[in-house]
Structures are given as C-alpha cells and as structure tokens.
C-alpha cells in the first residue's frame, strides 16, 4: 500500500545530503533532453537537485513475475549516469513508499547493469541509526528502541553494487604540476581514486574537474580523494562526473573502498566517511554491498513555469 500523497509530479529525496528528484513516468512525463534536466536541477531557477531518477520505466517484460524495475539516472548537466549508489537507495525507498516492494530483495536495472536492493527491517539497524556489522552494533534491543525506529521516516537500504572491475592505466596521474597515486576502477561507472593525506573540499573543487576531463578518460570519470584512517575506516571527498562537488556518493564509496583494499590498506568491511555522513561497504564477497540511509524530503507539483522547464518549452519572451 502506497504511503505517498497523490497528485504530485515529483518527489525530492536525499541520501547523506546527496539529493535527487524522483520523477515517475506514471505520474508525469518530462522531456529527457539535457536542457530540460539541467533546468529542473538548477538550484536557483529550478527545483534544485544533484540529479533526476526517472522510473520505474514500463517494459515489455513488466508482466513477468520478479521482472526488474527499470531506472534511468541523469546528472545535473543532462548526461546519463550508468549507476548511482545513493540514487539506488533513494529509488528503492521510493518503490517501498509506493507499495511496489516490501522487505524482500528486489532488482533494479540501470544503464550500468542489474543491482539487487533490500529495505532493511528494524532488527537490521542498531539503536543510534547505523547498520548491523558496524562497530557498536547491539544484538539485543529493547521495545522502546524498536518502536523508535519504526517511527523514523529515514530508512536504511542495502544495495548489491556488483563486482568491481579495475581499469587499465598508469598508477600515477600528473595534474596541475602535482603527481597523485591512483587506482582506476569501474563500479558500472568509471572512477579514479586519488590517495591523499588530508583531502579537502577545496582540493576536490580545484583538482576534481581537471581529473574528470583528463585525456586518460575520454568519457570523463568520477573522482575520489581518499584518506585511509585505519583498517576499518576511510574518508573521501568527491567530485562527480556531470554533477561536480557532492557531499556523498554511494558508488564513490564503493570505488574508494575497493581501491584501498586492493592496495592492502583496509579490511573487507569498512566505514566510508564523507561530508554528508557515512556508509558501510562490505567486500567479503565479489559482489560489493553498500548500506546506508535515505529519506524523502518533500513532494511537489510543477507550477506552469516548472512544467515548461520539464517539457523543454520556452517561455514567451525568452
């Protein structure tokens, strides 16, 4: 049963400060042109968003039991992303709130491949809001803590992000007169992980776009600035391809974690700290699992102005 209000055109969600608009083609159809998407994501003239999640998209196999939900992911510059970890958690929560999925695992088809998602039950979350398997997890909880979690609108979602694939290329990258140690990896979308002692937002904003558009990456790349704190904890700053500086990223967390493990710097389970919060990355199996929160911020109806943006129609006098 859906808990979403009816009659809305889009729904704004965020996952650790990484915000997306969910646009369901069953509710409203928008232009998927780069200009329309950029206009909606504009934080001054549009709604404001780190991207658009367009789905679930009907498919010929939709009548088949257990067929996957189809999702398209768009960056604020209008380019289409292969995969987004935070976006997948948000989309999973949307499907759950619409009553399309329950607590059982389900599949989502993205441009970057199939992923399996699961809404975690209360028993899988410990009292301070983190996820089982992290330090401080308590196996036994009292009824009060159980009820408190049931009342939370924020939900934790586990996403099996697939197997990482390490990409060819040099283990170093020269940028703006500096040389960085790098690991190049695909999580269904490309990432370049740079090892840094003290990553900062300023560094990500200045070096990130140079790496994103480096000739080594003809299709551009996502960029992570990685600091290893200990064998169970890393910290990253993020520059996302097509989006710019972001507070958090699920696929970036996976890429940074598998890069650190490849270099022998961390164990098979790590906490990835970002400016927006932390995710748990489980690398004990080939299929990398990411766990973290998502929450719905608000629902919106497009004004005539926003509808013109969404449909890529110019206003009179433009």
Image (tube, rainbow, N blue to C red):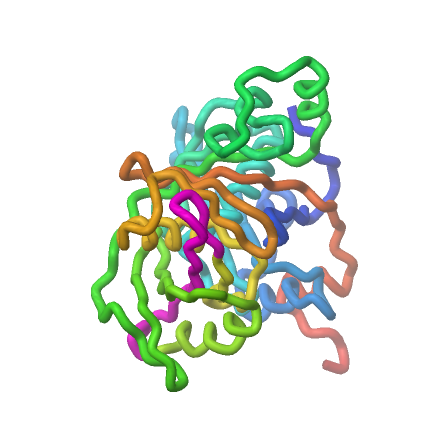
Residue 314 seen in render: yes
> Residue at the location (22% across, 68% down)?
169
**Is 292 located above or below residue 274 in the figure?**
above
Q: Residue 164: horizontal and vertical position, in percent? A: 29, 49
Please name whichever residue, 106 or 263, is drawn nearer the observer in this view of the structure: 263
* 220 part of magenta stretch: yes
Q: Residue sitting at 62 percent across and 33 percent down?
A: 129
Residue at (40, 55) in percent of width and height: 82
Task: Read off the magenta span.
Answer: 215-235
Q: Residue furthest bottom?
A: 177
Quadrant of the drawing holding the C terminus: bottom right
Seen in the picture, residue 300 relative to 36 is either above or below; the reply is above
- Quarter of the picture containing the N terminus is top right
Tell which of 312 and 151 is nearer to you.
Answer: 151
Count the numbered circles shown: 0
Residue 5 position within the rendered picture, expressed as x and y whole percent measured from the top left: 74, 36
Q: Is residue 52 above or below residue 169?
A: above
């Amino acid at each position: 049963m859906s808990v979403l209000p009816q009659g809305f055109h889009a729904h704004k969600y965020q996952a650790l400060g990484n915000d997306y608009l969910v646009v369901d083609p069953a509710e409203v159809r928008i232009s998927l042109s780069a200009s329309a998407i950029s206009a909606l994501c504009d934080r001054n003239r549009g709604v404001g968003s780190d991207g658009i999640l367009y789905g679930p998209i009907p498919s010929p196999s939709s009548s088949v039991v257990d067929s996957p939900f189809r999702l398209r992911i768009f960056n604020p510059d209008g380019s289409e992303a292969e995969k987004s970890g935070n976006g997948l958690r948000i989309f999973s929560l949307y499907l759950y709130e619409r009553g399309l999925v329950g607590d059982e695992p389900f599949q989502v088809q993205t441009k970057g491949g199939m992923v399996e998602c699961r809404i975690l039950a209360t028993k899988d979350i410990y009292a301070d809001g983190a996820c089982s398997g992290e330090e401080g997890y308590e196996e036994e909880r009292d009824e009060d803590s159980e009820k408190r979690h049931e009342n939370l609108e924020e939900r934790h979602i586990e996403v099996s992000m697939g197997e990482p694939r390490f990409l060819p290329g040099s283990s170093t990258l020269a940028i703006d007169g500096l040389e960085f140690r790098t690991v190049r990896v695909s999580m269904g979308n490309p990432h370049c992980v740079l090892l840094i002692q003290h990553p900062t937002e300023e560094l990500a904003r200045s070096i990130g776009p140079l790496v994103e558009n480096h000739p080594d990456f003809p299709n551009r790349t996502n960029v992570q600035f990685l600091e290893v704190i200990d064998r169970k904890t890393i910290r990253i700053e993020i520059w996302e391809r097509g989006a710019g500086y972001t507070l958090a990223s699920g696929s970036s967390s996976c890429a940074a974690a598998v890069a650190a493990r490849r270099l022998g710097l961390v164990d098979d389970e790590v906490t990835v700290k970002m400016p927006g919060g932390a995710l748990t990355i489980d690398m004990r199996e080939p299929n990398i699992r990411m766990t973290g929160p998502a929450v719905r911020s608000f629902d919106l109806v497009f004004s005539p102005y926003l509808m013109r943006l969404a449909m890529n129609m110019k206003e009179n006098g433009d």
